[in-house]
Amino acid sequence: MNTSSRTTSSLRLADATVAYGQRPVLDGFDFTVPSGRFTAVVGPNGCGKSTMLKSLARTLRPRAGAALLDDKPLGRWRSRAVAQRIALLPQDPVVPEGITVKGLVARGRHPYHSPWRQWLPGDDEAVSKALSATGVADLAEQGVEGLSGGQRQRVWIAMILAQDTEYVLLDEPTSFLDVGHQVDVLHLCQDMRAQGRTVLAVLHDLNQAARYADQLVVMDGGRVVAAGQPADVLTEELVAEVFGLAAEIAADPQSGTPMVVPVHRR
Amino acid sequence: MRRLPPWAALVIVSAVLLLACLASIALGSREIDLAGLWQVVRGREDEHLRQVIAAREARTALGAVVGAALAASGMLIQGVTRNPLGEPGLLGVTSGASAAVVTATAFLGFSGGAATVWVALPGALLAVLVVYLLGRPAGSHSVVPLILAGAVISAVLYAYIQAMILTRPDVFDSFRHWVVGSLAGASYATLGAVAPALVLGVVLAAVVAPGLNTLALGDDVATALGTPVALLRATTILAATLLAAGATAAVGPLAFVGLAVPHLVRALVGGDHRWQLPIALVLGAALLLGSDVLARVIARPQELMVGVITAFLGAPFLLWAVRRGKVTA
């Protein structure tokens, strides 16, 4: 990866209005992705988390304002050039019938190809690196359809690694996984960050977000209501206001990070 | 799930195509034995043999090209709609070409023959254009409106065709031959007439093939991997239309080639469209030539129309595909 040469790179939304149909989900929204960090985005359902992620990944286009990569609107970049810098794992990617693990991961190389160069010498190496980094090298020749949910999610993350981008956007990567596999995925996010990538993930579990991410962004009603280090952001007032939950903030016995403990009903 | 390496699959289907070509030259109501073929290769054949061979060469060339085009078209349609039962007729190619032939016969005193291609080709392209304009997804990227528009336009056109052939016996007579699909009377002139459409179609198919690999993962992943989804979809439909319209205009509608071959191709090389395209082209050519040889020898000295054979061979494939889809769904 060539992130070291781009210390000034930035990805942000500037005064962006994004809508499905008539109703804007984000209205005059500003947000800069914290560079080189693993940032967790949390907030109640329908607060605009996924919308923000999709706008940053160019799968949704702002009606007004813009998503900017290095201060240039995403729409003015070549599609493949953006895809070499920003990867997105959406909530419900489609697994094609009969595809193998290796075949799926290899599709992450698409941004580097062109109509007259549909294969490249570096493809195989990038794919096998991604397979071993996510611990699915043993499954390379197996069909993806036969895998468990946790294995599948590793395979999708391997595809993103094969894409070899500096920005990695993940939309609820831990949903529908059991807790063991949730932690697996969060460790992979930390690994990606340790490799110098910028990771932005929508998460639901506040405790996991506080424990594994190094930045926390809290959204409510289409706005960012708090952002910063988890220990500074996660307060009893914030949890009450944003999630309508009476809770005590305790220290995680393992990591010392803030942990939300709902108040006991008597 | 281990498969042959794709290049090995390509070598094997190429060998099958070569055999099919030889059989297509050698077999027919006048058989040419190996010694005869060898004479041809050496350029020392007699005059009658030379004429037979010349006719069969044109027939073989057209059959191979048409089979390849239909198979590639089916592969593109199945890829872009993510529907394993997709085929070019879905977008109105067949009904458009048929309606044009019927119209020309009924109102313009058109009598079939080599000129058919100049009627069927614009008819097919026009029908797909109407379907595309009606079903063009507005805002959403769904292809469902497109498929519905194709079904509606086809239904209307078939109703019109039925009305014409029931009221006009002359139309019925010429149309019933064309609609089955046949390679008899193939000529290089026909091939030349559809060649521009087919060449453009193949070039576009090669350009869109990698993008179809990303589209298979869903629109969001495709976009994130750098595929301009709307443009890719339009280009793929254009390529599939050019290929199917060219093939249909040249020989009439051939049932099941576009539907069945892509299934065989996936069984051979899996879902990578970069390999699917060359394999589909070669395998489609081989299967259509094989069907044509069968059509020539099965009822000797008469010959069947190749469309009858492809329909008979294709129906079991369709059944297999449907059942396979049910099991994995």
Image (tube, rainbow, N blue to C red):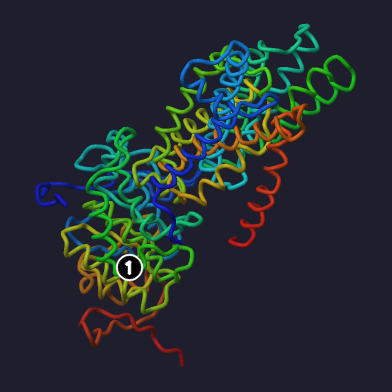
Which residue is at the front of the view, B279 or B17? B17
Report if residue B147 is visible in the image.
yes
Which residue is at the front of the view, B119 or A12? B119
Task: Give the left or right position of residue A202, taking residue A68 as reference.
Answer: right
Position in image of residue B290 (x %, y %): 61, 36
Report if residue B137 is visible in the image.
no
Task: Give the left or right position of residue B252, taking residue B264 as reference.
Answer: right
Position in image of residue B240 (x %, y %): 54, 31
Residue that badge 1 annotates = A136
* Residue type, label 1: Val
Question: Quarter of the image holding residue B247?
Answer: top right
| Other residues around mark 1 within 10 Å, as few (<14) / some (14–19) / many (≥20) | some
Instruction: Write the residue at 31% across / 40% down.
Output: A66
Above-or-below relation of A182 to B310: below
Above-or-below relation of A18 to B176: below
Q: Secondary structure at mark 1?
A: loop
Instruction: Write the residue at 49% across / 31% down.
Output: B234
